[in-house]
Image (cartoon, rainbow, N blue to C red):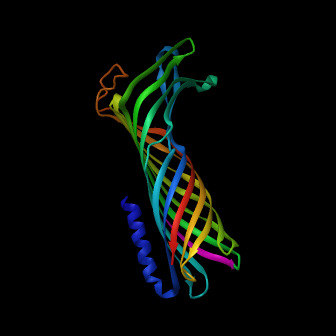
Amino acid sequence: MRTHVTSTVVLLIVFCLFRSALGAVDVGFNLETQKMFGHTTFHIEGTQYFPPIGSDVKWESKLEFPLDVFLLGASMTLEGKFKTGELWGINLFASRSINHPSGYMEDSDWIGLPEYKWREKFSFTESDAELKALLVYVEGRFGLMTKPNFSLELLGGYEFQDFSFEIFGACGWQGFEDDMVYFDTLQGINVVDYDVTYRILYGGIAAYFKISPRFCLEAKAAFSPLVSANDHDDHILRNKTGDGNCNGGAVKLGSNLRWIIFKTSSKSNWFLGLGFEFMKIDTDGAQDQSWYGDDPASEEDDTGNRVTGIKEKLTSNQSTIQAQIGYQF
């Protein structure tokens, strides 16, 4: 949280320092409701020696958390022209989730022998999920080309995402085809707490099309080679935590249709907006696990044990529908 607040303060200081190079500034405020679809996933894997077969066995575990939530947010925009004529803009935005996901958290486990090209799923569970989500971004724009009904802008920004989950119950199966056990237990019991944070520094391009005096269409595409992802996983029933640190990239695509519904002056107006955004995040790194108590899944007392350097991937697919109402002056 401190990082993106600091980024916002720095951006405002820079704005004040360069204020003398700017012409008139238009200010806008809008409220936005969002419906997000998608998931955030962590996947870990490793190898362990298995004495009965005298070989290393590869294991994998994947937890997929739902992001099917509504969010409510607000933004402030500053727009204008440099005295040299180029367009510029700054957008500050923040939103929070206002309900819990409609989907389930899915937990899958595999075991395999890579040398024999054998891999089989031996466990799958679904659990209820509660989510608190926070999205914040700061975006700046610089005009590249301006025509009467078209403009092209360079954009760059920083986005912070935090998803905090509480997971309840477990329904699924374990075992192999000849010896499979089905269960539906622990309903209402908090079994996992999970938090993942994405920090995304991105750049891209945006195009604006003036369809009519009251309608404007925006399309944008951005890419980030600088994504930092951190997660904390607490498997409460196993007295075990996992902390991961990953790096990677992201792709972001979006569009927005704005309709000016009422003009109060030549510059001031009320508007409605409808938009769509898609983002794909892909990172990899390592996770460290530690036991703060005895793990009932093992025969020995695991309290105080620690395993480091477990291969981890943190990924997310996000699709968001946006509806806005705002005022610009």
The magenta-colored residue range is: 138-146
Check the image and report above or below for 299 versus 307: above
Check the image and report above or below for 265 versus 277: below
Q: Residue at x 60, y 59 (%)?
A: 275
Q: Is residue 327 left or right of residue 185?
A: right
Q: Is residue 137 left or right of residue 146?
A: left
Q: Residue at x 29, y 24 (%)?
A: 301
Which residue lies most toward the top here?
178
Residue 137 horizontal/vertical position (percent): 48, 62
Q: Residue at x 36, y 30 (%)?
A: 188
Check the image and report above or below for 204 versus 250: below
Task: Pick the residue in front: 21 or 131.
Answer: 131
**Is 142 part of what is drawn in magenta?**
yes
Instruction: Report the quarter where the N terminus lies.
Output: bottom left
**Is 60 part of what is drawn in magenta?**
no
Task: Pick the residue in front: 195 or 297.
Answer: 195
Residue 55 horizontal/vertical position (percent): 53, 21
Task: Pick the residue in front: 218 or 314.
Answer: 218
Task: Pick the residue in front: 24 or 204.
Answer: 24
